[in-house]
Image (cartoon, coloured by chain):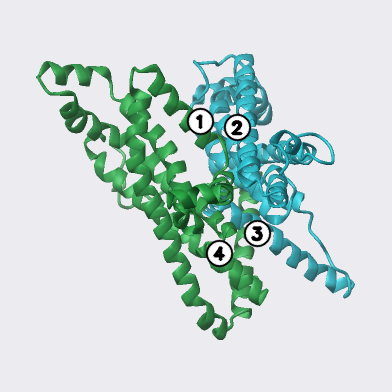
Chain colours: A green, B cyan
Amino acid sequence: MSEIAPASVVEKPPAPPRPWTGERIAGAVLLGLWLLCGIGLVAYLVAAWKPELFQRYLPYYLSGLGVTLTLVGLSIVFGALLSVPIAWMRLSQNRVLGGLAYVYVYFFRGTPLIAQTFLIYYGLGSFRPELQALGLWTFFREAWYCAILAFTLNTAAYQAEILRGAIESVSRGQWEAASALGLSKLQTLWKIVLPQAMIVALRPYGNEIILMIKGSAIVAIITVYDLMGETRRAYSRTFDFQTYIWAAIIYLAIVELLRNIVDWIERRITVHLKR
Amino acid sequence: MQSVWTLLSWGPDGWLDEIASGVKVTILLALATLPFGLLAGFFVALAKRSEERTLRLAGSIYTTIFRGLPELLTLFVVFYGAQIGIQQIVRFFSPTATVEINSFVAGMIALGAVFSSYASEVFLSAFKAIPQGQYEGGYSVGLTKGQTMRLVILPQLVRVALPGLSNLWLILLKDTALVSAIGLSDILRQSGIAARVTKEAFLFFGLACLIYLALAIISSFGIGAIERRVGQKKGPAR
């Protein structure tokens, strides 16, 4: 029997040399370019650093951020409330109700949010006498309320589709089994279907919130001073391009944070599905 | 007060010709962005599924940035940033020159970057639907890597990716409305001008919405035809 060296003595063969393939070169070059961009950006921000600019505009940016988050938060909540009846109409057997909901959803998903916002803010302004007679003019005069209304109507259409898709993704057998056990329709929906549907709906809901945060930048055009609006104001006063860079950094940070929160929630609520 | 039909007529009294030119700009911008965005998206997807870690990272940075920034902000950054950047470079050579960036080109770059980062995700998930055996089969009959990609993988990839890509096309069509903010005379800007001059804001912005809706409906028909052509039509398009 030949002697076998104990396992600890045997050395691992060295890793084969990694050749410089085309992919590796491309990867190194592209990553180098990003690195260069990053260094350039930091260098630019350091070179353009002006404490007085910060002192002056930081409060504006923070209030703008608050406006953006409030706008998105309110619209998402109101939109969620509105989306329930729309989804119910879409799911109902009634042709008229289903058709109405379909037209609503198609209109708000088929046209740009910015055009809808203009239609509500500028468009409804041409009915000023009628609105004044109804006492609604104080509402439609303010860009802020118009923005919330437009965003709510828009996100309601998207959320209704998410809700409908999620409820339809739960198989019919679940409904039948629940009704065999004597649960009412509402009980079935609340206790059996929705918990399963929400797992499917979580990611689309997260994406919808992110889309709303990004989409909310357009209210700056109708003179609401959200984060984008404050940025445009700061830029028009200083002509300093770093105002836009800071806004971009803030938006990116919010979106990434949200995305990670959604990932985390999804990991938590699908633990029972993992094998 | 002019009647609605005069306002919507063709010619010096009506605004239909102005709005039609806006429609042309919108469609041209979307069509010009599409090939550029698709190609870039495909290559970013290739980078993100590469075995090379650096390439994957470079691809992810690209999508993280352009999916995370608001489209409007991207547009402004490209429009003003490129203007300032190129101006600096040109000043270096001739100190008195001024540069103006074409807003059409700025819109194309910004929308193309956003489109390609979303498209790369669509392509990436489509790649996952193609089994490894397809590559191995291609190599075993003696095709090179590029040939396998072009002749074996791509035709299957297009079928799988088509629903996602058609969704992105509809989003792109809607996103073109943002270029009105940097002064390109698209549908929204032209109807905005008409609204301001005639004081019939509801009429013209309503018309703009309907035109966008019509474009979306026409696109759906076109996409349906393409889907039938490549042989994967499952029920009506949503």
Secondary structure, mark 2, is helix
Please give the name of the residue rendered at 49% of the width and 24% of the height, measured from the top-left corner: B131
Residue most extreme to the left: A182
Q: Check disc 3 and give the amino acid type.
A: Phe
Read off the residue under disc 3. Answer: B76
Residue B5, horizontal then vertical, whole percent: 72, 33
* Mark positioned earlier in the residue sequence (2 or 3): 3
Please give the name of the residue rendered at 55% of the width and 32% of the height, measured from the top-left corner: B167
Read off the residue under disc 1. Answer: A106
Secondary structure, mark 3, is helix
Q: Residues within 10 Å of mark 1 (few under 14, many from 20)?
A: some
Callout 2: residue from which chain? B
Q: Are marks 1 and 4 on the same chain?
A: yes
Q: Are marks 3 and 4 on the same chain?
A: no
Q: Nearer the viewer, residue B193 or A206?
A: B193
Q: Are marks 2 and 3 on the same chain?
A: yes
